[in-house]
Amino acid sequence: MTNTEITKKIDKKNKRVSKKVTGYGAGSVDVVMSVDQVAKEAASISKNAPSVSALEKLANNETFLAINELRAGYGKMEILHNFNLRIKKGQSLCLIGPNGAGKSTILHSIFGFTNIFSGTIEINGKDVTNLTPSQKLSKAGIAYILQDKSVFPQMTVEENLLMGGFLKDKPKEAQKSAEMVFDKYSRLAERRNKPAGVLSGGERRLLEISRALVMQPDVLLVDEPSIGLEPRFIDMVFGILEDLQRKDGKTIIMVEQNAKKGLAFADIGYVLVSGETAIAENGSKLLANPDVGRLFLGG
């Protein structure tokens, strides 16, 4: 077989192979983009990074939680570079961007899990930058819903909920809050005396969110709420978060790999690149942005 014949045979075979692959977030794309490619192209759209005044406008000039020129990271490694954030009380904000952009580091910094090199974090005008995680919860009203499964599988559903009260050192209030959770979510009420280990993935996520609510926070930090869940449970979790924001007035900052779902939910979206904000806009406008769609929404 000649080289020409071999080439034709390979070309013919390649034509039978589908080029559709899953990209970042949801949807499909014709070309596989590496993490490095996404980061490089994302960096090219970050030349006109939003000003602080633009961030304040997105928060309706009623800032409740502010991050000011924050430099933070782990050990001596700086991940966030002069990062700014503004959000109004009762708003929701979704952080998207390539892997390693610093999305989870923002949540970690707000809650006190990183080294802060400079800059400040404020809640309602009060500097909370150097509070410990337990103080962030008890004094600043910030609760963190972790990305990894964090229920105690051997403890009952009710005992898991009450742990929220012990963390805030208010066990009596926790009992009342737990009953409110059971009144609100029949899925958990029916399983209150069952070990948390028997719950489905969606029910565990509901328990994690509910345990945070028992702590009666003003701000919810939510890391990858849809990770590992079936579509029906993803819809349930986002429905619960929407209820908490719209009806209970919770301020929500989330990181979400399913960028379409996160931006469709959030009032505001930030696109992060290399520890800085490349784009900040209303969630619906980011969904319609062709560059954001190409890089993060699967086409």
Image (spheres, rainbow, N blue to C red):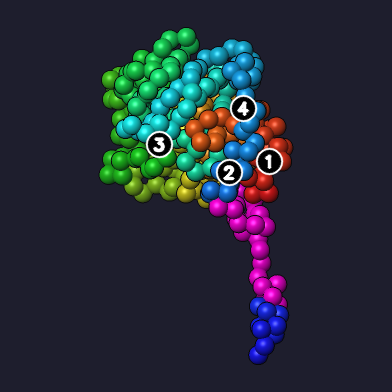
Q: Are marks 3 and 2 in contact (CB under 8 Å)?
A: no
Q: Are marks 2 and 1 in contact (CB under 8 Å)?
A: no
Q: Which residue is mark 1?
A: 291
Question: Mark 1 or mark 3, which is nearer the start of the sequence?
Answer: 3
Instruction: Please tell me whether mark 1 or mark 4 is closer to you in this view.
Output: 4
Q: Which residue is mark 2?
A: 40
Q: Main secondary structure of the magenta part?
A: loop
Q: CA distance from mark 4 to mark 3?
A: 29 Å
Q: Which residue is mark 4?
A: 49
Q: CA distance from mark 3 to mark 2?
A: 29 Å
Q: Position of residue 16 (x, y in %)?
A: 68, 73
Instruction: Please tell me whether mark 2 or mark 1 is closer to you in this view.
Output: 2
Q: Are marks 2 and 4 in contact (CB under 8 Å)?
A: no
Q: Relative to 56, does residue 83 appear above or below in the rendering?
A: below
Question: Mark 4 or mark 1, which is nearer the start of the sequence?
Answer: 4
Instruction: Judge the density around disc 2: few (<14), some (14-19), many (≥20) Cα neighbours within 10 Å.
Output: some
> Please, what secondary structure does the residue beneath circle 4 have?
loop
Q: Which residue is mark 3?
A: 146
Q: Residue at x 40, y 27 (%)?
A: 72
Q: Residue at x 53, y 48 (%)?
A: 36
**Three-letter amino acid code of the residue under disc 2:** Lys
> Please, what secondary structure does the residue beneath circle 1 have?
helix
Residue 28 is covered by the magenta coloring: yes
In the rendered structure, which segment of residues is drawn in magenta? 11-34
Q: Are marks 3 and 1 in contact (CB under 8 Å)?
A: no
Q: Which is more toward the observer, 194 or 38? A: 38
Instruction: Using the rendered view, name the quadrant where residue 258 is placed.
Output: top right
